[in-house]
Image: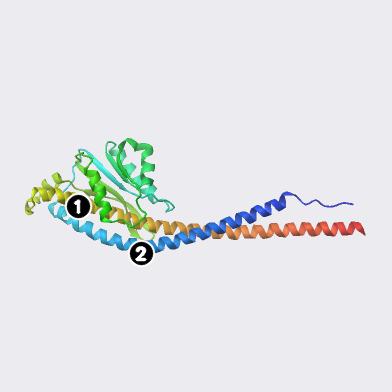
Amino acid sequence: MQVSAVPVNTYATLREIESRLKSIKNIEKITNTMKIVASTKLSRAQRAMFESRNYGETSNEIYTKAETTSPEEGKKLIIVSSSDKGLCGGIHSQISKAVRSKLASEPDADLVVLGDKAKTQLARLYANNIVLSFNQIGKEIPTFTEAMAITDQIFKLGTTYDSIEIFYNKFKSGISFEPTSVPAFTETQLKESPNFSAYEIEEDVLADLTEFSLANAIFWALAEGHACEQSARRSAMDNASKNAGDMIGKYSILYNRTRQAVITNELVDIITGASSLE
């Protein structure tokens, strides 16, 4: 009597494929849910972004009309606007790349990093440049209160900076963003502006104006970055869901073929055994 042997690992492979297929379906559910959540948050983030943009542009008008500029030399501070959350494509990598490019030409600049993602990436090469960092960034829509608290901590450093530059991701559309930087001017720079004499500002008010303008700029950067993050996360989760759908289709075909092969082998065994008894 001759019986064809069925490979033992065929059934194990079938169970593995079934388990993997189930895991991919669960992942697809998670990515679809995250996409929906990001889409909901994006509309609110965009409203906050437009409001902060109005505040920031209005605050910068005084410096534009006074023709304020930043000096090329001197102590420089770079503020990096990021967040703590991932799963949003290369949004954090791009802003870190822009900052690294800036630090390559100005290696002595101090860094204030908002968010753990950018801090982790920048600390690999420029850990000694980081003088202040903040976490718990990006969980909710940024507020001016948060920006003011960050500004207070920067002023408490006690360091006099000749120029300040803020790096953030600028929202361009629902599917694109661009790493951008804006200057934040100091009290001394405003006083030395060519058209500063057109304004009648008292000394104590001038110091408050400088701090308020920096807080406005940080608020603008945080709000723009938050909108970019939600947009990037929505796109990333959409792509992940599509990839999961493609994998589900491929594994379903593989599962059905493997299952059919197992059934065919079992039928061959039965027929061969029955034939041997005749």
**Between residues 231 and 205, which one lies in front from this camera angle?**
205
- State the colouring used for the structure image: rainbow
At label 1, the amino acid type is Ser
Mark seen at residue 271: none
> Mark 1 vs mark 2: which is more N-terminal?
2
> Element type at marker 1?
helix
Determine contact: label 1, label 2, CB under 8 Å: no
Q: Is residue 110 above or below residue 219?
A: above
Q: Position of residue 270 (x, y in %)?
A: 83, 59
- Identify the residue at horizontal 46%, vertical 58% (top origin): 237
- In which image quadrant can residue 252 be found? bottom right
- Identify the residue at horizontal 49%, vertical 57% (top origin): 240
Q: Position of residue 142 (x, y in %)?
A: 31, 56
Judged left or right of residue 253, residue 276 is right
Q: Quadrant of the C terminus?
A: bottom right
Q: Whole-Å distance between the Cαs marked 1 and 2?
A: 26 Å
The residue indicated by pointer 2 is 43
> Element type at marker 2?
helix
Q: Position of residue 22 (x, y in %)?
A: 60, 57
Judged left or right of residue 183, residue 275 is right
At label 2, the amino acid type is Ser
Q: Position of residue 105 (x, y in %)?
A: 29, 39
Q: Residues within 10 Å of mark 1 (few under 14, many from 20)?
A: many
The residue indicated by pointer 1 is 213
